[in-house]
Amino acid sequence: MEFTVEFYENADGRSPVEEFLEALKASDPDDHAIVLRGLAKLRNRQYHREPLSKPLGGGLFELRHVGKLNTRVLWFFMKGRRIIAVHGIRNKGQAIPAGDLDTARRRMRDWQERFEA
């Protein structure tokens, strides 16, 4: 079962995840390549679980890469076997900061309201 991976865009057409990935490419090309490979793996259902991916609750999931800094891309499912990546973060700790979770949930709701049939 193949899924498509798409990036959230706000109403103005800006994609915060693509911007996050571009910044990551400039600052840490090796982690950037690993995260891109992880996003590509999400097309296959077998990778929708640990260690690559983990549910965060409320329909939100994280793609995880542990390195010098932990790199995460937060995402959710949409109808039609679509995965929407809504937020990217890097941090030293294991926990995802509450503000980042709030941002991801807000973007998820925004996308669902605009595009759910």
Image: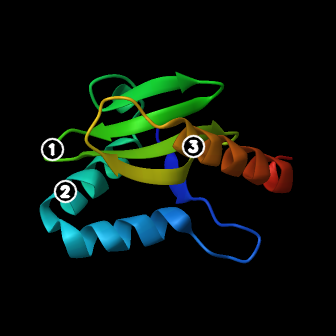
For residue 67, which numbered disc appears in the image? 1
* Mark seen at residue 99: 3
Q: Where is residue 68 in the image (x, y as percent from the top left)?
A: 13, 47
Number of labels in the image equals: 3
In the image shown, does 95 or 19 lie closer to the viewer? 95
Q: How many other residues sit within 10 Å of disc 2, few (<14), some (14-19) or many (≥20)?
A: many
- Residue to which mark 2 is pinned: 31
* Among the two numbered marks 2 and 3 on one chain, the one whose residue lies closer to the N terminus: 2
Residue 11's label in the rendered image is none
**What amino acid is found at the position of numbered circle 3 in the picture?**
Gly
* Rendering quarter of residue 22: bottom left
Q: As shown in the figure, which amino acid type bears the numbered disc 2?
A: Asp
Q: Is residue 22 in view?
A: yes
Q: Is mark 2 on a helix, strand or loop?
A: helix
Evaluate if marks 2 and 1 touch, with contact meaning CB atoms under 8 Å apart. Answer: yes
The x and y percentages for residue 78 are: 67, 41
Q: Quadrant of residue 32?
A: bottom left
Return the disc, 2 or 1, that comes first in the chain's sequence.
Answer: 2
Please rate how many residues cluster around mark 3, counting C-alpha atoms within 10 Å: few if below 14, some from 14 to 19, many from 20: few
Foreground label between 2 and 1: 1
Looking at marks 3 and 1 on the same chain, the residue that comes earlier in the sequence is marked by 1
